[in-house]
Amino acid sequence: MNYCINPKCLSRQNPDNLAVCQSCHTPLLVNNRYRLIKPLRELDEFSSTEIFEVDDGGTLKVMKVLKRSKLSLMFQREARILQQLRHPGIPKVEPDGYFKLFINGKELHCLVMEKIEGYTLEEWLNLTGKISQKIAINWLKQILDIIKIIHEKNLFHRDIKPSNIILRPNGQLVLIDFGTVREITSTYLAKVGSERSITGIISPGYTPQEQAIGKAVPQSDFFALGRTFVHLLTEKHPLDLPEDTKTGELIWQQKAPQISPALAELIDEMMAPFPGKRPANAQMILQRLERLKQNQGNTVKPPSWLLTGMILIWLGMTSLVGLRNAMAVYYYNRGLEYHLARQSEEAEAYYKRALQLNPKYAEVYNALGFLCQEQEDMDCARRNYEKAIAFQPSLAIAHFNLGVVCEEQQDWECAKIAYQQARKSLPAASNNLARLQILNKEYEKAVMLLSEAFLQAKDERTKYAIMKNWGWALMGQKRYQEAKEKLKSAIAIQEKMAPAYCLLAQVWESEGKMQAAQVEWKNCIRYASQYNPDEATWIEMARVRLNAGGNEK
């Protein structure tokens, strides 16, 4: 769906509001270059900016449009800073990426920048849970390399938090939202040293006290970065963690047993309540991290399995069993690290060591099943998932994975039972079960199941799949208008996935609107994969329809 800016839609109550309409047939060409595609967030009359996806000669980019002229100096500063900073971890802005747009006599400031694909670290945390020490050190080094460049330009960011860091598919972290960046000028320093007011940028839980009162310094970025990694390491928002009433320090280390005391100590220093107690610059922190990586820190935490085993022995419990189980946990976690790094052989070796110590370790069988599935050995995957369930019947993810494998093997009854077992904990399982009901023409059951599942879904992929199947089920019930709404909502979530386009084409055909269907069949073919059973069927349908042509009735 293409969008246009329509001057008639400018609100009289809020003349600065940039409304977006779907009433034009030709997408607006902004500044004779950028073709407007769609908004990237819901329109908000209280927000100072609107954000759109634009097409720049075949390259997708992001355009920010400032609605409030009183913030134009800050907006121009963001543009200037991003134009001069060149780093893969910073969104790129071309020299002509900032310009002004005039609509009905209103001046709108526009900034076009590189579109960053991937998940924010906030989204990543929701998907995968707390991170390991190895990942923490890697990510800390990446962000500090970015901060180092920013600080060397006499700038500081002022709004570092998980939602402002994106993980690209290639593993590169990108720091975004430079609208809060401040330059360290003599005027700024004079204000900090006086009682003159400076706007305080506040993100609760991440912002240090000195920044909240308008006295931010470069070390304020280190505080926010430390709080960000506490969140990633503990899976707890900083506001949900207690503070020492005497020192003001965050009490968090017991929630992150997977990291060494040396790393925890460094993060605590970064979060020191008084800026003078924090590291002086990014290079100092990077040097500490390098020593940690090489296990040359002053203190190194013994492996968790060793500590656990010693405690069990000391308590006089079943020491040998306790130690073996603790070592199994250690090997399983090591296997996961290699698995995430796509080193399958090393991961499998560690998983098997864990099973030698604890032959009933359900999570390990689930992980081995996933390894087999990645290697397209479905029999091996099914055996391991069934073992995981046998040892831990409540392990929802193993039921879900078994359902996927059973679908691959066209064992529909097995898949149905597996998804039913997993659906209480996993919205994706409800979605997959609903898809089976749709294929079986049980549309009413599917609609009910999907409406419940959508309320529980958190990540974008699951939301897309649920919305797509919801539209599919409504189409089966011949509720075409509702089906179109759901399918268009799915496309807004994931515009480069084929199924919603393929289904929307069929809805248009059902209404006799063949020209509209042709457009969606083209999108269907553009994004569909021959290796997906549903999409392979739709590819053939699309080819037949497009070859036959068709006129709108």
Image (cartoon, helix red, strand yellow):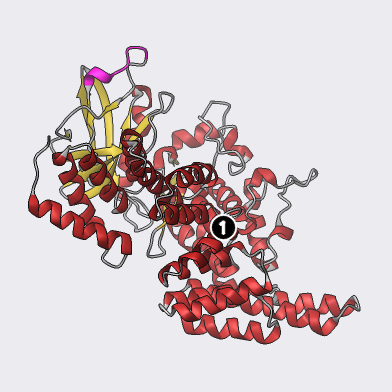
- Residue 43, percent across and down? 38, 29
Relative to 249, is 312 on the left or the right?
right
The furthest residue to the right: 316
Q: Position of residue 151 (x, y in %)?
A: 45, 51
Badge 1: how crowded within 10 Å, few (<14), some, or many (20+)? some
Classify mark 1: helix, strand or loop: helix
Q: Mark 1 — residue? A: 420
Q: Amino acid at mark 1?
A: Gln
| Quarter-of-image position of residue 539 | bottom left
Q: Quadrant of the N terminus?
A: top left
The residue at the point 41 percent across, 64 percent down is 171
Query: Residue lying farthest front?
Result: 441
Residue 105 drawn above or below residue 220: above
Using residue 125 as the reference point, say whether residue 479 is left or right of it: left
For the record, the magenta segment spans 7-13
Q: In the rendered image of this protein, does residue 244 appear above or below residue 315?
A: above
